[in-house]
Amino acid sequence: MLLTRFLSETGMVELTGYMPVPATEAGCALVRTLRCIRGGLKFRMACEPRFDYARPRPVVEQESEREARLCPPGEAYGLWLLAEVPIQAVDGQGVEAVLEIK
């Protein structure tokens, strides 16, 4: 687990990240959660994965308002991003979300 605190004059937020260890490789996940300790902060989250030593730009498939698949061009493997807030594809880069935690 990794715990990171963001502090400002307007608030304090904790980001917790962890990787549950499954019995098999299928279903591996990285879980990140934000929790407001006091006040509030505005965040911009960007997920811009780079495959194959950053040679190709990722293909972004927006599955729904809160779900996207990012993979190398012409490949079946990649990653799924599931969010509890709306995310938006960024032209050939990845996805992003802007949210305020209170």
Image: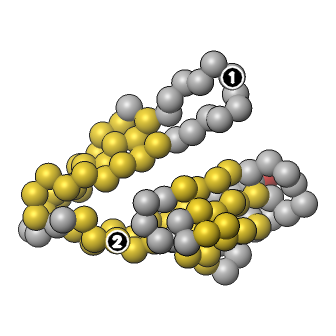
Res. 8 in view: no
**Residue depicted at 10% across the width and 57% down the height:** 38
**Relative vertical location of residue 80 with respect to residue 100 in this rendering, above or below:** above
Residue 70 percent location from the top left of the image:
70, 60
The residue closer to the viewer here, 34 or 72, is 34
Quarter holding the C terminus?
bottom left
Local packing at callout 1 (Cα closer than 10 Å; few below 14, some 14-19, many 20+) is few
* 50 is higher (above) or lower (below) than 14: below
The residue drawn where x is 31% and y is 53% is 34
Q: Residue 56's image quarter?
A: bottom right
Q: Does 1 appear above or below 45?
A: above
Q: Position of residue 98 (x, y in %)?
A: 39, 74
Q: The residue tagged with tag 1: helix, strand or loop?
A: loop
Residue found 64% across the figure and 58% down from its top: 49
Q: Nearer the viewer, residue 16 or 68?
A: 68
Q: Quadrant of the N terminus?
A: top left
* Amino acid under disc 1: Thr
Q: Is residue 34 visible?
A: yes
Dot placed on the residue nearer the N-terminal end, 2 or 1: 1
Kindly report the distance in space between the C-alpha atoms of the residues bearing marks 2 and 1. 34 Å
Residue 94 point in image, percent of width and height:
63, 68
| Amino acid at the residue labelled 2 | Leu
Residue 99 got which mark? Answer: 2
Q: Which mark is residue 60?
A: none
Query: Dot 2 surroundings within 10 Å: few (below 14), some, or many (20 or more)?
Result: some
SS for dot 2: strand
Instruction: Quadrant for residue 7, please give it.
Output: bottom left
Q: Are marks 2 and 1 in contact (CB under 8 Å)?
A: no
Residue at the disc numbered 1? 24
